[in-house]
Amino acid sequence: MIKFGSKEFDLTLIIVALILSAVGILLIYSAKYHSDNPVERAIYIKQIIWVLVGLSACAFTFSIPLRFYEIFSYVLYFLSLLTLVLILMIGSSKMGAFRWISIGGFNIQPSEFAKIATIFPLARYLAYSKRSIYSFRWLASVIGIALLPALLILNQPDLGTSLVFFAILISMLFWSGVPLFYLFLIISPFISLVCGFHWLSWALFFLILIMLLYRLRPTFIFSVGFLLLNLAFGTITLLVWNKLHHYQQQRIIVFLDPGRDPQGAGYQIIQSKIAIGSGGLVGKGYLEGSQTKLAFLPHQHTDFVFSVLGEEFGLLGGIILLGLFTFLIIKGILIAQKVRNTFAGNVAIGLSAVIGFQMMINIGMTLGVMPVTGLPLPFVSYGGSSMLLSWVILGILLAINSRWYEY
Amino acid sequence: MVALLGVIIFMLIGRMFFLQVVKGTYYNRISEENRIRLLTLPASRGVVTDRNGKIIATNRPSYTVSLIPYEVLEAFAKNRSQKSTVKSEDLTSLVGKLALYLKLDAHFLEKKIRSNLTKSYRPIKLKKDVDFNTICVIEEQNEDLPGVIYQVEPARKYLSADWVGHVLGYVNELTREELSQGSSKKGFRLGGVVGRKGIEKQYDDILRGKDGVTFLEVTARGKILGPLEERKPDLPVSGSDVRLTIDIDLQAVAESALTDFESAAMVALDPRNGEMLALVSKPGLNANLFAGAMSPGEWNEILENPLHPLLTRPIQATYPPASTLKLLIAAIALETKIADRNTTLSPCRGSFQFGRKTFGCWRPEGHGRLNLEEAIIQSCDVYFYQLGLKVGLERWSDYAQLCGFGQRTGVDLPEEEKGLVPTLKYYHKRYGKGEWVKNLVINLAIGQGEILITPLQLAVFFGGLATDGKLYKPHLLKEINNPDGRIITTQPEEIGSLPFSSFTLKVLQDAMIGVVNDPHGTGVLAQIPDIVVAGKTGTAQNPQGEDHAWFVGYAPAEDPQIVVAVLIENIGHGGTFASPVARKIIEEYIRKEFAQSQKDSTLQISSY
């Protein structure tokens, strides 16, 4: 531990994040190395600039006292909601989806910052609310805080990012001591939504739900309410679905899982699997990936950056990268355990969940086991908003770590 | 929480191990030697039939002849027993044969092949839509035609009748610009077709289906090794079949009845539900021209034709309705008790003096003193000039709008025109705020002046007059047959009701029977033995040439089953030219219906 004045400072976190960023720059350089376009070849320089910007953002957030986030949590939250509403109205279109605001030539993606801004009010509510977790008010507020930005982002439409909010919510609830079965109840309507398509599996699921409720005996109204909610989700979606035309159904399926669209994302997944699979144990060597060279993957420097790593550095490179991420996330959980202030602990868990969830979805997508959602790999993928967010998360984690003794 | 993270990391590494170690050699082979090619499996477009299930549009195989350059080079090399150099004679002889079989210019063909002659398996398209006989010849000669292949794709085939182009429209390929303008979302692809006009455009979503796709493993040179084992092909989903309300036999009769006229419009519908039975627009449009490969010359010929063959006249051309609209002013007068069946006005002496202006009657010798019914039967202009002044402009335009004029009927064809109902406001805007504009109703009363309507609007209006005043949305779609067996039937949709009492309608109906059956009637040429036809003639003044002839009629008068509106451009009197056409169409339909019901009743009897 190095001490800056009176504050403890964890250098290992910074080093790991820097290694990840450096790997990202190398992979972006490789992805565009064979391009004919000199502007494209030079985008790694832009990424270096973003890392520098990220570092200063990290230093800035590190210096902000934790009290600030606690006091202004709702203000920050409503500001981010406001920007989300704003882009719904004036956002510029990128690849058919409205996600960006252009200010003086810079594209800013407000949904990235909404992730952090949602963690604060959730952490504060979970830390200080005196209500019983079985009360309707408690449940509604907790879910509402996460659902509001998620719905606004789903409308953009960006399914992947809105799912991040659920990952944040579930992991923070779990951290706050909400029992597992209760988390199960919260997600049960969504399971009903999926199971509703097959009556037998839905009936089985219902049976399990009733048994759980019977054993755990929450209040009567609570139980009935959840059963009705499940019933509604299961039946209504099925009814609506059957009313739809075949091509409308197809459109929804492709929205939920773009990998089904063979002309677009489906093709990318196949190419990504070929790239990673052909990398073998140790890879083809830096700048030698043939899939990468032939530019079969249109997003290989952004969302599919992991496939470049897989092809050129093989299983070994992949395991090292996963190791670095694991280190970051475990460090985040350890910080949450160490810190005395409940609010700060909750924040640390939420931030770690963002990194962990995005890593899982992104790498899973390039390996063909997760749906294509367009979530970037933190620190590694090309892109300013994502890089900035990653370093801001790191800055806040470092700040919590260095002030662990504060109440 | 750490345990969960451990499980996730473990699963990701497991998956990487599976891809990179277990299947590593497989993926390595693909990435080293081969490429993945996407092959579209085109969906076949839905079949369109008439109301009796007779096919109007279907699909036929279309052959595209292509050349695989790699195989050509290999064959040449074998001939010479030496590699690399391509002898000009070899190529010239191949090009010569191909030019002969495909009827293409040899120079053009040689240039096209030469510029693409690389060691590649990617086919060069030589000619699209080659006829089957040529394909047979190429098949027989394939020893002498190395590398020449043909591919089959579905193409549209239409019933070869001139009306089909107007009702069904046609399909053709999407342009690059259209694709980049975001239509890719709806499942379009380059080389795919889209409906451009008529039913093909209106119901494109339903007819198109969904293309399938298959992934092929090909070598770097383009040789197909077979389907990619890890992804099954998405099979194409055929478009839904569509049954129209059109009767192609009736359509054929209508077509032949109008065969002597250059430009005309005809629409026949069932007033009880709005089903359109026939729709003719002359000059006709051969839809098959568009389905195949059309030359720029043929396209320009259509575009530059002064008769505008692309215009679907029954719904897109607007005309003054002329005397056919005298029924409107008569109805208003009856409804507002300005006149009854027997009201007489100043006798007709061949013209009508108003202020300093003289308005002539079509019969210069005059009709004498007539009551309302007789005035309709003989179509006396002077009577209606006077009635128009009594009704007044504002009341006239209010009622005209209530009857559906100046608004689209909502027919299921693209780009319907709505026509124009001039109002006091319209005239004030156009001529300034003078009281005198109200007198323009004199002309409107006989359906002349600024009023413009489509033949379809008039047919719908007469459908209401013929029955109990209910107006049904005219439509061509009778049924959608989904590939999964679901059938969706169009229900008749009421779009309004004429603002007239049954008493008023009865007077008009009697008068319309008189128009055709009274010896003085203007529409006597529409008479059919044993069937009571009713209707109204019209002769629209045309400043550019001969008058346009109108006849709108229905039958049987006691239980109307068909309304027919006929308009013939630049020809003369409606009673002389349009009535006989309408008669032929009505007669065919009623006889057929009668024969059908006879057959049905004999069947019933024999089953006892």
Image (spheres, coloured by chain):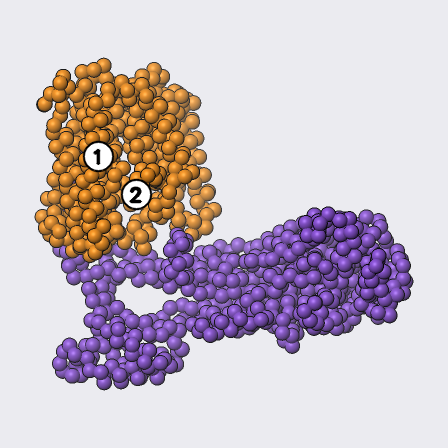
Q: Quadrant of residue B294?
A: bottom left
Q: Quadrant of residue A178?
A: top left
Q: Is residue A249 above or below residue B65?
A: above
Apparent side of residue A25 relative to residue A78 in the rendered image (left or right):
left
Instruction: Residue B461: give its label.
Output: none
Return the residue nearer the eye: B355 or A258: B355
Which residue is disc 1 drawn over?
A53
Which residue is disc 2 drawn over?
A373
Q: Residue at x 34, y 17 (%)?
A: A129
The chain that hosts pointer 1 is A
Nearer the camera: disc 1 or disc 2 = 1
Q: Classify mark 1: helix, strand or loop.
A: helix
Binning the other alpha carbons within 10 Å of mark 1 as few (below 14), some (14 to 19) or many (20 upward) gives some
Q: Residue at x 34, y 38 (%)?
A: A103
Chain letter, colour orange: A
Q: Position of residue A328 (x, y in %)?
A: 17, 31
The chain that hosts pointer 2 is A
- The amino acid type, in three-letter code, at marker 1 is Val
Q: Residue at x 25, y 48 (%)?
A: A299
Asked if labels 2 and 1 touch by Cβ distance under 8 angstroms, the answer is no
Q: Is residue B153 above or below residue B138?
A: above
Q: Quadrant of residue A23?
A: top left
- The amino acid type, in three-letter code, at marker 2 is Thr
Binning the other alpha carbons within 10 Å of mark 2 as few (below 14), some (14 to 19) or many (20 upward) gives many
Q: Position of residue A392 (x, y in %)?
A: 23, 30
What distance separates the C-alpha of mark 1 from that of mark 2? 26 Å
**Which tag, 1 or 2, sits closer to the chain's start?**
1
Instruction: Look at the image and tell me in which quarter the N terminus of chain A lies.
Output: top left
The hue used for chain B is purple
Residue A216 appearing in the image: no
Instruction: Look at the image and tell me in which quarter the C terminus of chain A lies.
Output: top left
Return the residue nearer the eye: B381 or B288: B381
